[in-house]
Amino acid sequence: MDHKELRGRFSTLDKFFKSYFGYLALVDYCENIDQAYLGMHPYTHISNTLLSDATIQWCKLFGTDSESTHWKKLIINHSGFREYLFETIKQDKNGFREYQLSMLTFRDKWVAHYESNFPHGTVPLFEIAVSSATALQEYLKLNQPEDYDYSGICSIDAFGHSFGMALLDPLKHAIKT
């Protein structure tokens, strides 16, 4: 694997995890914090932006094959990764494809473009996005070249918790529990 390309995938995964876990950290507090800002809803906007970015980052890796950062452009053994992915996320090819299409539709009709007839409450559940991104992260780490020095996320769960705390810590004065 090319080191520069591998570093790029890890960077995209890092952005996905930061955006998703940032969204999770904020979403339950937005209404409470936003009350102080006279209908401007800044934290709801930030939370929505983080979810939109998580969608974009995931689609860069798992969306259409034409994406320059799609996993197929880096991993040579497509069938080996697919087998690992489907086993890890407990989905078959058809189930994953259905999910992939729901994420692409959400990205295309809500995140990237506004289509007024798109049902705006239709946000895909992100469990499969997180588990597939985690599977890709682990697969890349397991198959990285011996001379590649990985220095990224070691534990997705620990990272998510730490990132959420780092995001919320400066806001603790505004969060009423």
Image: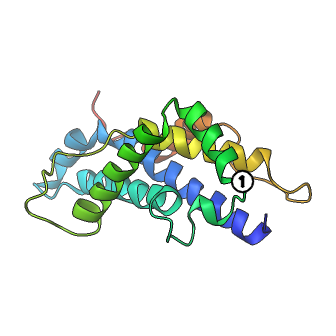
Residue 58 place in picture, x, y as percent: 47, 55
Which color scheme does this rendered protein use? rainbow
Q: In what quadrant of the picture does the N terminus appear?
A: bottom right
Residue 104 place in picture, x, y as percent: 34, 57
Q: Residue furthest right?
A: 147
| Residue at left offset 45%, top offset 64% | 64
Q: Secondary structure at mark 1?
A: loop
> In terms of depth relative to the viewer, which is nearer, 30 or 151?
151
| Residue at left offset 34%, top offset 38% | 125
Q: Is residue 69 above or below residue 48?
A: below
Q: Is residue 59 left or right of residue 14?
A: left
| Residue at left offset 53%, top offset 42% | 132
Say which amino acid is labelled 1.
Asn
Q: Is residue 171 visible?
A: no
Residue 7 place in picture, x, y as percent: 71, 64
> In terms of depth relative to the viewer, which is nearer, 175 or 86?
86
Q: Is residue 165 above or below residue 20?
A: above
Residue pointed to by mark 1? 77
Snapshot quadrant of residue 112: bottom left
